[in-house]
Image (cartoon, grey):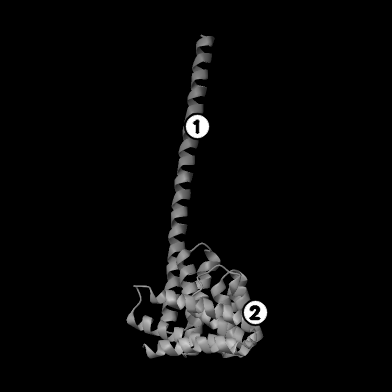
Amino acid sequence: MIIFLLKIMKCFKYFLFGLLSLSCLLSCSDKDENANKIEKVEEENQKVRIDEELEVAETCFEKGDIANALDAYMKVIKDFPDNEIADSKIRYVLMQTPRMLHKKLTTSTVPDLLNVLGEMIKVKPDIGEAYYALGMIYGRELGNMEAAVLCFEKAESCNFEKTATYYDDMGVSYGIAGDFEKSIQALEKAIEAYNNNLQRTDMSDEQRTENYEKLINTYSNLGSTYINLGDNAKGQEYIAKGESLKQKK
């Protein structure tokens, strides 16, 4: 009888152990499910935050408020460094900044832009487009060619899409600063890029016309730079090329 009772108690113990194990499994399963739910909610909240900041940035840029557009994009990049949309958009706005500022198409002031660009390169020290924008602000807007050249040198060390306009602006900046050899190197790259652009089939007539006019102007700048360097013959050669293109318009 005693042996029988001991067997029953042993079986009952195993039964209780089984119940406890099942309870733990169910509890763990509930925790995992809750954790997944929390993770999904956090992901949805992150997406909402990103979308809101991107919308703010787009609206600001459409209104010509470059500084606040850049600031809104940077808020996304600070929290989500790998966000490709914000990274792509901010690079586009930066490349448009010199033109918009020069043509007074922005409500942002030079101090506003210097401030936001300064903060930007602290967060993304490898963003070449920011150094390009800074170079143009210091050079064309403030007349500080020493600072402009330093910014262009920093931009050159960064990996980003360097356009014909970028090389053109860099060449002019070096020329004004008196570094004619570097000016020539940059202007020659600009001419090559402008000529390559004219071979593209995806440009509008307006873009093609603008590119052609810039090419003419760059030939003239290159010619003047060679003359300043003491090579009058080569200078006149490039100026003549520009005049020849002007006649073909």
Position in image of residue 119 (x %, y %): 60, 76
The residue nearer to you, when weighing 169 against 45, is: 169
* Res. 44 mark: none
Position in image of residue 151 (x %, y %): 62, 78
Q: Across the whole image, how many numbered discs are drawn on residues?
A: 2
The residue nearer to you, when weighing 32 against 221, is: 221
Amino acid tagged 1: Ser
Position in image of residue 178 (x %, y %): 65, 87
N-terminal-most mark, 1 or 2: 1
Amino acid tagged 2: Leu
Disc 1 target residue: 21
Q: Is residue 134 left or right of residue 206?
A: right
Q: Is residue 28 visible?
A: yes
The residue nearer to you, when weighing 140 against 216, is: 216
Q: Is residue 214 above or below residue 29?
A: below
Disc 2 target residue: 150
